[in-house]
Amino acid sequence: MKHETLKQASIHELVAAFAKAAELHGQASVEGRHRSANTQYARLTATWRELRTRGEAGRSALTGLLQDSNPRVRLWAASHALEFTPMLAEAELERLSQGPAGVVRLDAEMTLSEWRAGNLKFMED
């Protein structure tokens, strides 16, 4: 979604865009398609920025993605939810870090490590 489209999107549409970008980012990463992964990362970031402007409704919608069936979606949702619900987000990242070997597990482990070391910073509005 373009910036103007994001501003006009419903929270439901934003959550769907976030989940799709998370899934596509994961696929591109595993397949070594780094340009595509970077494009999806930009979409994730833009969608998250817009969800942040929606206050509690945006945070609640993102928290709902912690129950998504796709571990890639849960990984990205948990990583972003660390900012406002660290206990819930850390619990999901812990679950993912105990999952099958692969990119999701490694990313969850690294995210937890960096979070706990105080190295993760969230963008300002």
Image (cartoon, grey):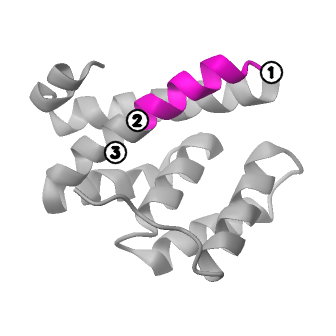
Residue 70, quarter of picture? top right
| Residue 119 higher or lower than 66, as above or below | below
Residue 45, quarter of picture? top left
The numbered mark at residue 48 is: 3
- Alpha-carbon span between mark 2 and mark 1: 20 Å
- Residue under the image location 63 percent in, 81 percent down: 116
Q: Residue furthest left?
A: 8
Q: Are marks 2 and 3 in contact (CB under 8 Å)?
A: yes
Q: Which residues are magenta?
A: 32-44
Q: Are marks 2 and 1 in contact (CB under 8 Å)?
A: no
Of label 3 and label 1, which has the lower sequence position? Answer: 1
Residue 56, quarter of picture? bottom left
- Residue under the image location 52 percent in, 59 percent down: 79
Q: Which residue is mark 1?
A: 31
| Residue 50 higher or lower than 81, as above or below | above
The amino acid pointed to by label 3 is: Trp
Residue 10 location, x and y as percent? 15, 32
Report the magenta stretch's main SS: helix
Residue 115 location, x and y as percent? 60, 74
Of label 2 and label 3, which has the lower sequence position? Answer: 2
Task: Rate crowding at label 3 as few (under 14), some (14 to 19) or many (20 or more) other CA atoms within 10 Å.
Answer: many
The amino acid pointed to by label 2 is: Phe
Task: Rate crowding at label 1 as few (under 14), some (14 to 19) or many (20 or more) other CA atoms within 10 Å.
Answer: few
